[in-house]
Amino acid sequence: SFGGAVAYEIAQQLTAAGENVALLALIDSRNPALPLPAPAFHPRFVARRIANQVRADVAGMGDIIRRLGVRTGARYLRGRTAIALHNVLYRRLPARLWPLLWPDPIPRAEREWLAADASAYDRYHPVPYPGRITFLWPEHSLPTEVFDTRRAWAELALGGFDVRRIPGSHLTVVVEPLASITAATLAEALCEARVEGEARTTPEGRDAPGRAPAPGARR
């Protein structure tokens, strides 16, 4: 999510300086105005979180197996379930109980800078963006009634909000084997933005004087 806020602010500053931003793409970035549930341990929360994760896995299992093949897809799903369970326990158990867990797949130094990023992220207050936001949304994350990262961005995207579904969850979409699918989706959005930009620079595609370009949005 932190990288999404950085990209959003860069696009804002470039636009304010008169530069043309052809594409602002966010990969499952939570709007800082959308708070996460307060970090507190409750016995029922762990069971609910695991149940939600299983629901997300079952919903997306067929698509992941189809895209990756049976062997690679099954290995991915096993690893994802183990990491998800560890993250649930790490975030919800008191620190004194962490040694009882199996080895953390995320190094301690990385945990520390992730916490620093999260603190800075929550202090950022995005303002409306004059262009379009392309949002890559992992369709196998938590059920939307539990948490939906798409919320609160559409209201800020004055030029439209374009949602593109990709397989995986918040973290797995940027690591193999799913990273290549994310990259292909992003490359497609870049190609479309390039074509739109070239069309606007031709005499036939230029907007009439004094008329703003019509924002195109796909949901």
Image (cartoon, helix red, strand yellow):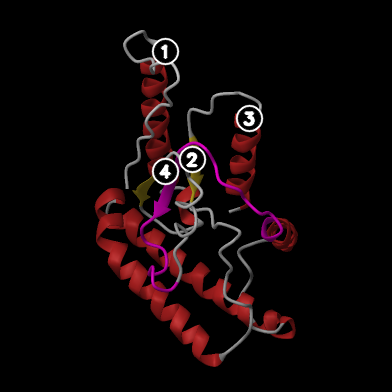
Dot 4 or dot 3, earlier in sequence: 3
User: Whole-Å distance between the Cαs marked 1 and 2?
Assistant: 22 Å
Mark 4 element type: helix
Q: Quadrant of the N terminus?
A: bottom right
> Of circles 3 and 2, which is in front?
3
Decide: is 55 above or below 187: below
Inspect the image, locate mark 4, and give the three-letter code of the amino acid beneath it: Thr
Inspect the image, locate mark 2, and give the three-letter code of the amino acid beneath it: Ala
Q: Which residue is mark 4?
A: 182
> Of circles 4 and 3, which is in front?
3
Relative placement, left or right, of 26 versus 89 is left
Give the magenta part as a residue range. 121-146
> Of circles 4 and 2, which is in front?
2
Decide: is 3 above or below 159: below
Q: Which residue is mark 3?
A: 14
Circle 1 crowding by C-alpha within 10 Å: few under 14, some 14–19, many from 20: few
Circle 4 crowding by C-alpha within 10 Å: few under 14, some 14–19, many from 20: many
Q: Which residue is mark 2?
A: 25
Relative placement, left or right, of 153 versus 196 is right
Dot 4 or dot 2, earlier in sequence: 2
Q: Which residue is mark 1?
A: 201
Mark 1 element type: helix
Q: Position of residue 134 (x, y in %)?
A: 43, 42
